[in-house]
Image: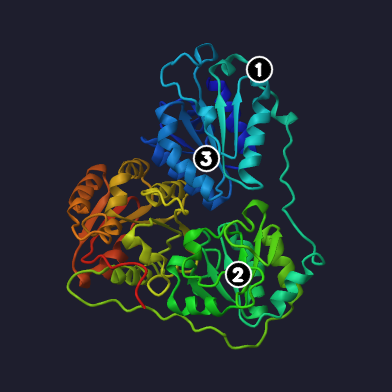
Amino acid sequence: MKGIWDDIVRMLEAAGPRLYTGVPGDDPDIIDAARAAGARFAAVQDQRTASYAAVGWSRLNDRAAVLATATGPSLLNALIGISEAYASRTPLLVLTTTNRDAVLGRGGFQEFPAAALGEGLFTWTHRVADGAELAWAVSRARYLAEHGRRGPVHLMISPEVADSRVGDPAEVSVRAPMPAGQTAESLAPVFKALRTARRPVLLFGGGTRQSEVAAHGVPLAAAVNALCLVTASGRGVFPEDHPRFGGLAGLYLPKESRAALASADVVVALGSQLEETALMGWDAPAIAGRDTAAQLIHVDADPSVLDRAVPAHYPVTCDSGVFLRLAADSMGSPVEAAPWWSSWQPRQADEGAGIGTVQFWTTLREAMRDRRIEVLAQENGLADLWGYYAPCFTLPPGVRPLVPSEQTPLGFGLGAALGAAADGRRVVAVGGDGAFLTNLPTLLAAARANADICFICLDNGGFGWPSLSRTDTTLVDFDAGSAISALAGATGCNTVAVREAHLLAKTLRTALAGSGPRLVVVRLTDRPPFPPAG
């Protein structure tokens, strides 16, 4: 089927360079085709890791990476990463070879009903059984992955296509759609509510884009004197060193910003599904008809998410960038007003001989300054959660985050780091020892590709999060730091472990300034509960 994959790579590259990843030897042969064409590729030894890398690359570039699998266990092993792409609305093109038509339904080798996978995994599924429709199918798949709702699409390729005629890609013209929009006139009541607000909050979700927030969201916040929050999936779109930044909404919100949100009179939620963790601690979510609640303006290009989690006073079907531009234009010049909210205060780490969780994150923030780091890939375990808490850690300017969505698959951040490194970025990947144990193939793949990733393993001796609900932690305790270091060293990664608090800053600065794959194992002495008390 070599010619088919050459054609697919040629069609996709014409629409923009992208990453092709999968396990070499799995069908289809698109990894070899990408390599022959000089395109970016990441050859890994585990389909789940490949799916994480593909999602990580796609989030950074806003284009669909290509994940290649065979049917059966190959596809099944990649489903966790695919579900992450669906939940986070990340463009992804999954190409899977199926069994031959003649043996389908007969219990063939690794036969799996891939066509039955649908809701919650793919936005579109199509089986290509005729080469004449291949150009159309690839073009439509890319279109649906990258526009509208966005997310993973699935093309299943029949082996019989290898002997069919391939349609002429020049005959297929798929143009980018106009973004969902409104007019300034139609949004006049919404803008009036925002203009007259005394305590407005802007909440930026994963459906917003950094360039549009910088161009229109920051000026809008200044014009209405708004406190600005982000969701976990929207992290990085608003500068975290800005005086209006109040932290991450919900579970991660500092107490000062939580109090401000409780007293807000208008909340504008942009590009967010307002999922459960984003609403935690919001004591009075906007309920239509309640005078004591903030008026909620919920903006999303997908009307199906409006009024789903929280009823809004103004549910607005509109692209977030379009809304921000129109709103900023209608509000006028920045106001001269003191902040109506109290700013959060940096958290001080407890001093001691060992390294505490809070101390690690406050030290990492300082260590990342001027180290030319471009991407922070982060997990979502117990020790990792403190990295989402603004008083402990804020993203340095210019650093892009790669974090899991509400699916929070363990090991995602580590695998996503591979996709970022394949794009030529300098990456820091932070995860707990449990996350490393679930995605050890990442270390092997990083070493083979000489990826510029500084891995940091937070070793607290077990699964920290489950331990908080148990009086007997025997079943969730383990000692994996030494084994993880040994494996990383065997793959060729430069490896160092640190236990003493006075050595932490120097160790991190040295590792961050290095190049190639490297690992720092940080032995933590605590498992502090999250969210923090007070």
- Residue 262 appears in the rendering: yes
- Residue 349 spot, x, y in % from top left: 29, 76
Q: Residue at x 60, y 71 (%)?
A: 202
Q: Nearer the viewer, mark 2 or mark 3?
A: 2
Report whether 234 appears left or right of 379. right
Q: Where on the picture, by quarter, is residue 45?
A: top left
Report whether 16 appears left or right of 481. right
| Alpha carbon distance from label 2 to label 3 | 31 Å
Element at label 3: loop
Say which residue label 1 marks.
165
Amino acid beneath label 1: Arg
Q: Residues within 10 Å of mark 1 (few under 14, many from 20)?
A: few
The residue sitting at the right extreme is 185
Along the line of sight, which residue is nearer the eye, 236 or 71?
A: 71
Amino acid beneath label 3: Leu
Along the line of sight, which residue is nearer the eye, 420 or 462?
A: 462
| Alpha carbon distance from label 1 to label 3 | 30 Å
Report whether 420 appears left or right of 90. left
- Residue 297 spot, x, y in % from top left: 66, 67
Element at label 2: loop
Amino acid beneath label 2: Ala
Say which residue label 3 marks.
121
Q: Quadrant of the C terminus?
A: bottom left
Q: Nearer the viewer, mark 1 or mark 3?
A: 3
Q: How many marks?
A: 3
Say which residue label 2 marks.
286
Q: Residue at x 68, y 67 (%)?
A: 313
